[in-house]
Amino acid sequence: MKRILPLLFICLMGCRVSVVDEVAPQPLFRTWKLQQIYITMLPPPPPFLVEFTRDGQLLYGADKARGGCCNPENFRVIDNKVQFYTAGPLPGICAQSLCVVTKLTAGVDWQIEQLDNRLVLRSGDKELNFVAQ
């Protein structure tokens, strides 16, 4: 019995789990300002802010609005690729919307080329360059 107690104590100390008070955010989960779109004959974009939230939502502009009719509302990251999508049906008013150019094209894989204070996404011949806000 005297031999078992020290062994039990050592096992309990080895199983102790350290708790970290604060987890550092992953670089993608922040607000990004689109600086440049590289694609043939496309002019520089007007100011465009998008926030990638931890729960997979995309929030647009300074007021952090949802995507609406023409912008995807959600994202997922799989193998260093971002996929944009909208979960659930769009409001009926969206059937009347003409979404000619959307910056974050849904339904395609966007390769993460760079992720630090800059975010560079590439899909085919389209490249989006963001800077952290």
Image: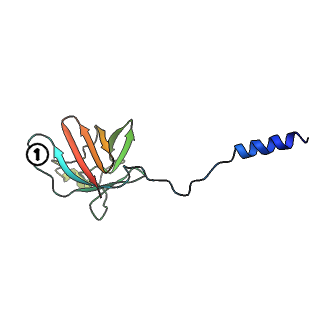
Q: Foreground: 16 or 94?
A: 16
133 versus 7 height, above or below: below
**Point 19% across, 58% down: residue:** 47
55 versus 112 height, above or below: below
**Point 15% across, 56% down: residue:** 46
Under mark 1, the amino acid is Leu
Query: Quadrant where the N terminus lies?
Result: top right
Colouring used for the render: rainbow
Instruction: Using residue 9 as the reference point, say whether residue 102 is left or right of it.
Output: left
Q: Residues within 10 Å of mark 1 (few under 14, many from 20)?
A: few
Q: Which residue is mark 1?
A: 42
**Point 68% across, 47% down: residue:** 16
Q: Position of residue 79 (x, y in %)?
A: 39, 35
Q: Position of residue 126 (x, y in %)?
A: 19, 39
Q: Foreground: 15 or 87?
A: 15
Instruction: Using residue 116 as the reference point, say whether residue 23 is left or right of it.
Output: right
Residue at the outermost left position: 41
